[in-house]
Amino acid sequence: MRRRRNTLSILRWTSLALIFIAVLLTSFQLIRYSRMRSSFPPGLTIGGVPVGGLNSSEAGERLVQAYGIPIELIYGNSLIQVRPSSVGFQINLETMLAAADLQRITQSFWSGFWSYLWNTLPAPEPVPLSATVSKERLIAYLENEIVPRYDQPAKEPIPDPGSAQFTEGIPGRELDIERSVTLITEALMSPTNRSVNLPYNRTMPARASFQNLQYLIRQILVKNQFNGVAEFYLLDLNTRDELSFALSKGEQIPPDIAFTAASTIKIPIMTYVYLYRDEPLGKTTEDDLKLMIEISENTPADRLLESIGGTLAPISFTEDLQKLGYKNTFLGGFFYPGASLLARYETPANSRTDVNTSPDVYNQTTPAEISQSLDDIYQCANFNGGALKAVFGDAIKQEECIKMLDMLSANKTAVLLEAGVPEGTKIAHKHGWILENDGLIHSISDAGIVYTPNATYILTMFFYHPDQLVFDPTNIMASQISRAVYQFFNPEQPK
């Protein structure tokens, strides 16, 4: 009996001990759960930032710290750090902490404790970031801080010192603000991806300025030691921008100098023929036009003039030019040696006293006016308009102007303007030079419409020297100028 009582006593105390231990363990777990329940549940993230086990104050500090880290902007080779507050970034702490707190108390205490004991607590749902970015402030920051300091403007081609061409233009860099706003906003909203490669657009260099083109042409003259008189006229037929300047012994002087027109006058003579002759012209007239333009013979020019205006054809021809507004271009007589001077013309150009190219009293023009003759034909051919149509109406037809340009394009010389452009480039032009009474060349000229990938332009150049113009050096210089103008309009084309 005593042994049985002892056994029961041991069992009683053992049970009590087990109950005590169970109560102790339960109390311990209850304390742990109570503490855990007072904080955010394990595994909870707010805006991608782990906050499990933290109270509201601690979680708030962690969020502010995580999203207060400066973001890095990479633009080209530059690294820029930006404080989020400087671009109007704000996080809504109260909203996020309140949403997180709901998950802490989503279950009743005892239900949650039971789940805790059985390790079946539900996984917390991530609380998304609640934040705002001021788009206006962000754009203002990019426009005022990034663009002025880190954008790189394209650099236009400039004359290459000592050469006859332009340097290569340098592309620029222009921030893509709209795309940058999107990427920066994404970085501000991320606690980990805080770096942005700013997107930008390449900006192509603008065409060189007319001022730089003029400088380069002058540089070419200096390089070739040209100390005579030269005048240039350039007209962009697409934009109507023009450049007109003249040099005498290397010094700039006003343009509109009177020059011996030589064979360039055959451009308006061709127009004169079409004003008074309708298609079909007849074989004789066709042949004379080709000989006058393509071979540059003078006898066919005289025949064509006389067939229209008789013995006073140079005067009627000049009167037609005056109707078109030409003040400095005229024919005072026929081409043949010994021809009588039918009229002596005093013009604004040949009345100048600051420069004298000893222009032929029979045949004169200026670079601007012979260029105007080409422009008149071009406007008629391409738009059925221009001065020819305005002054002479149906006497000149569009198809006739087209034929004139074709005829000028068939004038193949491989010198002067043509020598400076890539092979195959279309040029509707007329050149001119003559042997003077002393047996020397003193004037050389070329006037043409040049058709290129980027632009169609008129380029006219006249050179004069009182002593002599040796053809080969002058031709090389003229071709270099023609090449420079071609490159001016087509910088991406092979040089």
Image (cartoon, grey):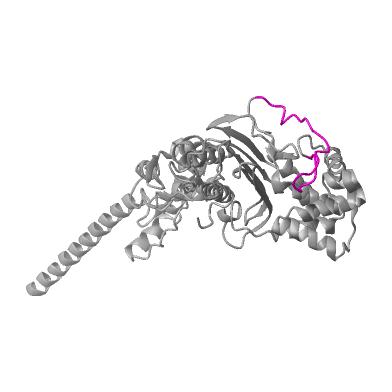
Q: Is residue 138 left or right of residue 399?
A: left
Q: Residue at x 38, y 41 (%)?
A: 81
Q: Position of residue 461 (x, y in %)?
A: 63, 43
Nearer the observer, 9 or 284: 284
73 or 253: nearer the eye? 253
Asked if residue 133 is positioned above or below residue 291 in the image, the reply reads: above
Say which residue appears at 79% left-offset and 52% top-offset.
301
The prevailing secondary structure element of the residues shown in magenta is loop
Q: Is residue 351 magenta?
A: yes
User: Position of 26 compared to 482: left or right?
Assistant: left
Q: Residue 79 magenta-drawn? A: no
Q: Is residue 90 visible?
A: yes
Position of 288 with respect to 11 (left or right) is right
- Quarter of the image holding residue 425? bottom right
Locate the N terminus and report the quarter of the image it occupies. Answer: bottom left
Residue 72 in which image quadrant: top left
Q: Is residue 485 left or right of residue 389?
A: left
Q: Which residues are the magenta region?
A: 331-353
Where does the image place residue 297, in percent across and percent down from the top left? 72, 55
Image location (x, y in percent) of residue 318: 83, 40
**At 27% from the left edge and 59% from the top edge, which residue is drawn?**
26
Query: Which residue is most to the top?
Result: 353
Q: In this orientation, which residue lies closer to the viewer: 13 or 134?
A: 134
Instruction: Single out the residue that lies furthest toward the left.
Output: 2
- Residue at point 84%, 63% (across, down): 284
Quarter-wise, where is residue 295 in the image?
A: bottom right
